[in-house]
């Protein structure tokens, strides 16, 4: 006597379908979590007044790059980690050589390369010499004798009589600067991490109902 056992539905096929559904669910959840974190970080950066250019340095990569996996992951990072990290931690900045940090005033203008201008670049650009003034209270100064143009920047004076020449503070000199903490990226990262289980469940339910 022979016995034949047929299993209907096919358990192997059912398990394969469940694994495929799980892969789709986890992958969708991780991509959603990564997209949400990227958006949250960019919103934080622009909200702190740091500009859209720095906000757009936040990037997202999802793994796998194609297809689905139960081990899906999302990576969110910045292409400007030093700048982002400084605003995220609020570090104490000291001069590398142990002397002064030169903070340009409005009269100094900006560097031709963008960002803060240095005393050396300022002297080369204007042809003026900076003079050190020590102050016991408040920051010491680097000043120059010249005139202020219509934009408020100090430039060399062409006056032979000295008319309009002023002594303008060009740089403030301080031993250190405490950068204010303007971001809290860990807060959003923790929220994104904690939201993953709920996203998996939500995507699983949506997948079942569709």
Image (cartoon, rainbow, N blue to C red):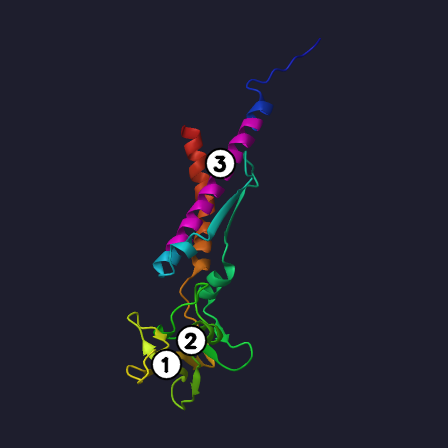
Asked which secondary structure carries label 3, the reply is helix
Residue position marked by numbered label 2 in the rendering: 103
Front tag of 2 and 1: 1
Dividing the picture into quadrants, the one containing residue 209 is top left
Q: Badges 1 and 3: C-beta atoms under 8 Å apart?
A: no
Span shown in magenta: 16-43
Residue position marked by numbered label 1 in the rendering: 169
Front tag of 1 and 3: 1
Q: Badges 2 and 1: C-beta atoms under 8 Å apart?
A: no
Task: Name the outermost residue toward the front.
Answer: 160
Residue 182 lies, in percent from the top left, at 40, 65
Residue lying at 48% horizontally and 71% vertically, measured from the top left: 91
Residue position marked by numbered label 3 in the rendering: 25
Whichever of callouts 2 and 1 sits on the residue coming sooner in the sequence is 2
Asked which secondary structure carries label 2, the reply is strand
- Name the foreground residue: 179 vs 197: 179
Whichever of callouts 3 and 2 sits on the residue coming sooner in the sequence is 3
Depicted 109 relative to depicted 172: above or below: above
Q: Is residue 163 magenta?
A: no
Depicted 33 relative to depicted 185: above or below: above
Q: Residues within 10 Å of mark 1 (few under 14, many from 20)?
A: many
Whichever of callouts 1 and 3 sits on the residue coming sooner in the sequence is 3
Q: Residues within 10 Å of mark 3 (few under 14, many from 20)?
A: many
């Amino acid at each position: 006597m022979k016995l034949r056992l047929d299993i209907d539905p096919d358990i192997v096929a059912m398990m394969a379908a469940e694994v495929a559904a799980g892969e789709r669910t986890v992958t969708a959840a991780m991509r959603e979590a990564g997209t949400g974190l990227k958006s949250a970080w960019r919103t934080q950066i622009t909200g702190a007044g740091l500009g859209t250019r720095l906000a757009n340095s936040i990037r997202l990569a999802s793994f796998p790059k194609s297809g689905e996996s139960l081990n899906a992951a999302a990576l969110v990072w910045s292409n400007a980690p030093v700048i982002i990290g400084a605003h995220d931690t609020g570090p104490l900045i000291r001069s590398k050589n142990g002397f002064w940090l030169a903070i340009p005033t409005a009269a100094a203008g900006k560097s031709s390369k963008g960002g803060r201008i240095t005393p050396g670049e300022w002297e080369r650009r204007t042809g003026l010499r900076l003079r050190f003034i020590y102050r016991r209270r408040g920051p010491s100064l680097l000043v120059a004798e010249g005139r202020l143009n219509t934009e408020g920047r100090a430039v060399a004076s062409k006056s032979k009589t000295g008319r309009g020449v002023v002594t303008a503070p060009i740089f403030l000199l301080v031993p250190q600067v405490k950068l204010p903490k303007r971001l809290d990226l860990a807060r959003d990262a923790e929220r994104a991490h904690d939201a993953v289980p709920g996203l998996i469940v939500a995507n699983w339910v949506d997948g079942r109902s569709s």
